[in-house]
Image (cartoon, grey):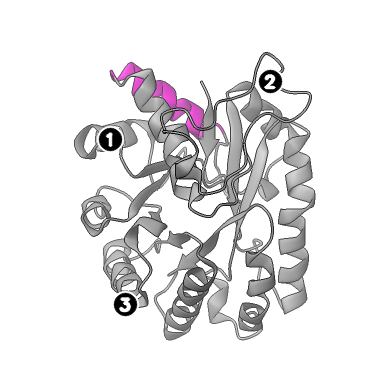
Amino acid sequence: MRLFDPHIHMTSRTTDDYAAMYASGVRALVEPAFWSGQPRTNVGSFIDYFDSLLGWERFRAAQFGIRHHATIALNPKEANDPRCVPILEELPRYLIKEGVVAVGEIGYDSMTAAEDEAFSRQLELALEFSLPVMVHTPHREKLAGTYRTLDVVRESGVAPGMVVVDHLNETNVELVKNAGAWMGFSIYPDTKMDEQRMVAILARYGTERVLVNSAADWGRSDPLKTFSTANAMLAAGFTSDDVDQVLWRNPVEFYGQSGQLILGPIPGFDEAGPLDATAGFEGNSILRGARA
């Protein structure tokens, strides 16, 4: 079983987590930029963090046989702090870097005017740099936030197929599906979504345009939730091909639109043979230049 975790904050995890993920079949991941657990007080704090995501964290993952990619953005929570907003001027130089596969996480936390401004400006950057977008839906007023998110995306001109709306649940999944955007689900031990609810959603809405992730942020979480979701799918009667679509081919298809996916085995790992990162697709066209 090969797994691609499309949204996981490995900065908050240990090397033991990387080892366990590899043993469970995780071979690639995307780490979105997010808040540091306490307020940042200046732009330099973001610069150091972005540099760490694209340097140290990628190296740390590679030591355990996992391909690490990142998304870069001013997150919605910190968009409300005037000390943080100037980082928007620095984003372009990071969006062109190797392994940056989307603009994100952007969207809403409290649905303020400051969040509106940051959201719109970063959607413009996604258009300028031809990158997919990862959208964070608010923890409070999730349905209202999803409506607003989809309206802003529509007005921006970003194609819905270039957008994943994340942290969905039963209340808003149909809205996102009907809009033509990708549907993202974060599987947690206690909150947001669990494996059984996820399986029920897949049974109802299908496996297309669905991304399932472990998130694994600063609170109680589990970096093996992609693995446990895969097992829950199999136990519920989904095929191994269904599992491969949801937990490998879908994230490859979505993030492959960036042209910045770097897949395939890391030297010293998977020596029995290379992982076929393009299985299920004709040629390499879906990757738009992704390297395998």
Q: Which residues are magenta?
A: 224-237
Type of the residue with mark 3: Glu
Q: Residues within 10 Å of mark 1 (few under 14, many from 20)?
A: some
User: Relative to 145, is 15 on the left or the right?
Assistant: right
Measure how far apart labels 2 and 3 are at the Cα level.
45 Å
Question: What residue does disc 2 label?
Answer: 270
Q: Count up the numbered dots.
A: 3
Which residue: 51% across, 20% down?
A: 1
User: Relative to 91, is 285 on the left or the right?
Assistant: left
Of the two numbered discs 2 and 1 in the rendering, the one whose residue sits closer to the viewer: 2
Question: What residue does disc 1 label?
Answer: 202
Of the two numbered discs 3 and 1 in the rendering, the one whose residue sits closer to the viewer: 3
- Kind of element beneath mark 2: loop
- Kind of element beneath mark 3: helix
Measure how far apart labels 3 and 1 are at the Cα level.
29 Å
Q: Earlier in the sequence, mark 3 or mark 1?
A: 3
Q: Is residue 213 visible?
A: no
Q: Nearer the viewer, residue 141 or 233?
A: 233
Q: How far across and down, in percent of the image, does residue 70 sit?
A: 62, 53
Q: Is residue 259 above or below residue 115?
A: above
Q: Residues within 10 Å of mark 3 (few under 14, many from 20)?
A: few
Question: What residue does disc 3 label?
Answer: 155
* Labels 2 & 1 near each other (Cβ < 8 A): no
Q: Nearer the viewer, residue 93 or 207?
A: 93
User: Relative to 154, is 54 on the left or the right?
Assistant: right
Measure how far apart labels 2 and 1 are at the Cα level.
30 Å
